[in-house]
Amino acid sequence: MKQKSKGRTPKETAKKIVQLLLGLVLVVLGVLALVYPEMLLLLVSLCIMIYGAGTLITWLGRRKTGTGSGWSLAIALSSIGAGLGLLLGKTIGGIALQIVLIILAVWLMSAGVLEVIGAIMYRKAMTTADLGIQAPGSMQSLILGIAMVVAGLLCLLCPLLIVSLSELLLVIAMFVSGARLVVASFSSDALTKEA
């Protein structure tokens, strides 16, 4: 059984650094959302786009090992699109609260379902590849996906509750997504092993 050396290529190192930075930025934006609640929509838009960028980077890294699925790419692109939609809607003349909640609900539910499917597919791919490692991040992706679907349903079914809890929920989502990216930037070294 042949293994690659423990060193990373410059390209892999750059991806890890970007992933780490994106995670840290999400955590910082979560703090800013607490400190400056009037900027919440702008910060949420940025966070959704950063989440999408981080997911895209993760997908690019997993694609090399044969474990990157189209689901991860779909999450990344839909997240970037939803973030841009919120950002552009705000700058063009404001978005009514109902439209913001609908955009957030649709994004949360679709990204959540895609996270769950991606986690299951990733775990299956890792098991099939028989790399002798646990699928890092698959459990976090599964939990995050379920939480996103529940939050999306709450946006549609209990909009007044979501409005009153939105800052707290969005800050928690920023922290969880940021922490997930930070953990992923350190944990996927085992994926470079060859069977």
Image (cartoon, helix red, strand yellow):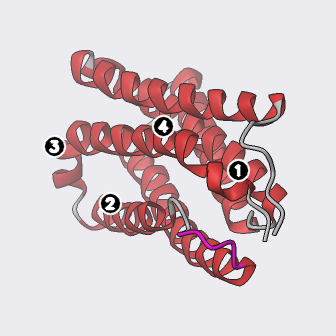
In depth, the one of 26 and 62 nearer the eye is: 62
- Classify 10 Å Cα crowding around label 3: few (below 14), some (14-19), many (20 and above): few
Of the numbered discs 3 and 2, the one sitting upstream in the chain is 2
Q: Which residue shows up at 51% across the image and 72% down it?
A: 116
> Mark 4 to mark 2: distance in Å?
23 Å
The crowding category of the residue bearing disc 1, from other C-alpha atoms within 10 Å (few below 14, some 14 to 19, many at least 20), is some
Q: Earlier in the sequence, mark 3 or mark 1?
A: 1
The span from disc 2 to disc 1 (Cα, nearest Å) is 20 Å
Tag 3 residue: 164
- Residue 77: give its label: 1
Q: Is residue 131 magenta?
A: yes
What kind of element bears circle 4?
helix
Q: Is residue 174 magenta?
A: no
The residue under label 4 is which amino acid type? Val
Between the C-alphas of marks 3 and 1, the distance is: 29 Å
Identity of the amino acid at label 1? Answer: Leu
Task: Give the residue displayed 56% in from the left and 78% down from the top.
Answer: 120
Quarter of the picture holding the N terminus: bottom right
Q: Amino acid at mark 2?
A: Ala
Relative horizontal placement of residue 119, taking residue 140 as reference (left or right): right
Instruction: Mark 2 or mark 1: name the one nearer the start of the chain.
Output: 1
Q: Which element is circle 1 on?
A: helix
Residue picked out by circle 2:
151
User: Up-down: is 139 above or below 186?
Assistant: below
Query: As shown in the figure, which amino acid type bears the numbered disc 3?
Result: Ser
Q: Are marks 4 and 2 in contact (CB under 8 Å)?
A: no
